[in-house]
Amino acid sequence: MNSDRHAGGLQKMLADIRTEVLYTRNLIGRDALDARVMAAMAAVPREQFVPESLQAAAFDDGPLPIGHGQTISQPYIVALMSDLLATRPEHRVLEIGTGSGYQTAVLSQLCAQVYSMDLIPELTETASARLARLGCANVETRSGNGYAGWPEHAPYDGIIVTAAASYVPPALLEQLKPGGNLVIPVGQPYMAQDLKVLHKDDQGRVTTRNILGVAFVPLVDHEGID
């Protein structure tokens, strides 16, 4: 992709995100996303996470297939979920659903350490190599069951799930630090799903807020995956 086309595509993508925010402001409760999030979206080369055959659509505001029945999420949703996570530069966060590594790379711009896991080893390996090539040195990946989380590095300042869970996994709430947010789509595959933010207060009490309807690939609960 030549530099002029890249620059034009990136600016269109950022403009589309801003437009989507305005369309949905009554649902998401904000007129603009955090400037740090928008800077991260501008800094991460989305075209590097999109299959070669789909490069022409790399900056379109929609999901794209990445193989293994998985997708790279719509840029607006990536930006929104990053915003809802409310990261700070010193935070350590857990991502469930590495996929292409695009959301992972955005998070790597926003916090000190990202732990990311995916059920599909091939995706984990490819994303890990891609992230290393792009200089995302504050990312650690593994393959495993997202419903169980990654207890070895818990507690986390925030947890983000990029596939639709059929229920909120108790293990993820356990691994969330007081004061942190869990951002997760919940619902049945290919049916109505709600993007939720669960906040754990300093006393460990959890409150839930529904943000808007979404459509994600399912988060598979597969026991026995290391």
Image: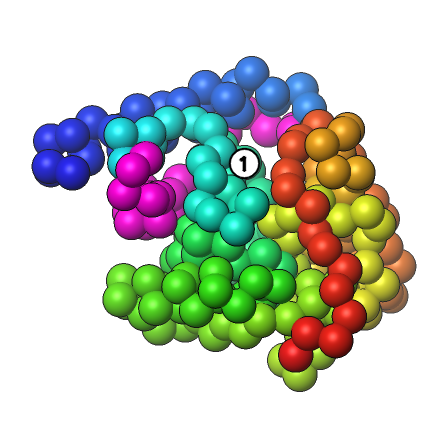
Q: Residue furthest front?
A: 68
Horizontal side of 56 relative to 19 (left or right) equals left
The residue that label 1 is drawn on is: 77
Q: Residue furthest bottom?
A: 152
**Mark 1 surroundings within 10 Å by alpha-carbon count, few (fewer than 14), some (14 through 19), many (20 or more):** many
Residue drawn at x 29%, y 49% is 48
Horizontal side of 159 relative to 19 (left or right) equals right
The foreground one among 82 and 31 is 82
On screen, 34 above or below 133? above
Q: Amino acid at mark 1?
A: Ile
Asked whether residue 83 appears in the rendered view, the answer is no
Q: Position of residue 67 (x, y in %)?
A: 47, 47
Horizontal side of 11 relative to 26 (left or right) equals left
- Secondary element at tag 1: helix
The foreground one among 127 and 3 is 127
Asked whether residue 7 appears in the rendered view, the answer is yes
Magenta range? 28-54
Residue drawn at x 47%, y 28% is 62
